[in-house]
Amino acid sequence: METLFEKYKNHKKIIGTLTHIKSAAAIEALGYTGVDFVMFDMEHSPLSINELSSYITASSAANISSIVRVSEGKREHILHALDIGADAVIVPSITNAQQVKEIIKYAKFSPIGERGYCMSRSGGWGFAPQSCNGLKNYMAHCNQNTMLIPQCETVGCVDNIYEITSLNGVDGILIGPYDLSIDMGIAGEFDNPKFITAINKIIDACKKNNKMLINFAGDTDTAIKYFNDGFDAILFGIDIIMYINNYKNALNVIKENI
């Protein structure tokens, strides 16, 4: 399976979704839709680490990359997500480069960071192909293919975005448009010139520093616009909202025609 990092380096347009349904079957079913990744949300969804492990297994079986948004940038949160096989980790509430330097320590092996090693699911407990050519090769493989993605959703992060994206160990940026607009004092005003200026600054920083650029889109028109604006990947919708909307729309059609 082509990794998320490989798709980005091969200039493919990447589309994923965010899951709140808490169902391994629902995640496996996404494998038939064409999505590239599914994001598991430890920040806003009541997922346990055991549930997360089974869901990452389901996404792997469906040939879908797995991204975990941890609740905060603590060592154990990042390390647990990586050890059970996450292809990328998103860390929310970033405000400055020093925070990012700390999470790089936890997410990347030496010589980039200080990630702790254990024979775990991420390396097939020592039997996966990336584990069979020695520890140094495994560490190098993880450093390249396991992505660390700070989430830009604060004014502080925007202010420091050029320094943050210049750091070795940062692989991309996810914009959190809702929280960013709230922190700017213009909640939900995505057409506000101040908000547009902030987004353009993030885009410019990522392009200059060759970092993967991701944004959230709740509808198809917005997703298309973001790709045309130069984004590399779109986090498209939340599965439970799409589930409700599709049933609601179908039932409305039926009721209007009987």
Image (tube, rainbow, N blue to C red):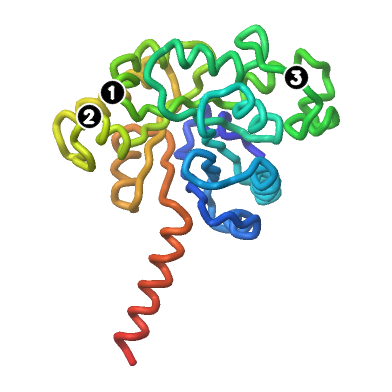
Task: Relative to 47, say whether 135 is above or below.
Answer: above
Amino acid carrying mark 1 in the image = Val
Q: Check contact, mark 3 vs mark 1: CB within 8 A.
A: no
Marks 2/3: CA–CA distance? 40 Å
Mark nearer the N terminus (2 vs 3) = 3
Answer left or right for 256 relative to 109.
left
Marks 3/1: CA–CA distance? 35 Å
Residue at 38%, 79% (x, y): give it.
251
Q: Quadrant of residue 81?
A: top right
Query: In the rendered image, which residue does mark 3 sit on?
Result: 117
- Camera-nearest residue between 178 and 15: 178
Residue at 34%, 20% (x, y): give it.
157
In what quadrant of the picture does the C terminus appear?
bottom left
Q: Position of residue 15 (x, y in %)?
A: 46, 44
- Camera-nearest residue between 46 and 59: 46
Task: Relative to 251, say whether 121 is above or below.
Answer: above
Residue at 39%, 76% (x, y): give it.
250
Q: Check contact, mark 2 vs mark 1: CB within 8 A.
A: yes
Name the element at disc 2.
loop
Q: Residues within 10 Å of mark 2 (few under 14, many from 20)?
A: some
Marks 2/1: CA–CA distance? 6 Å
Q: Quadrant of residue 23?
A: bottom right
Q: Quadrant of residue 228?
A: top left
Q: Which mark is residue 184?
A: 2
Answer left or right for 195 relative to 168.
left
Q: Which mark is residue 155?
A: 1
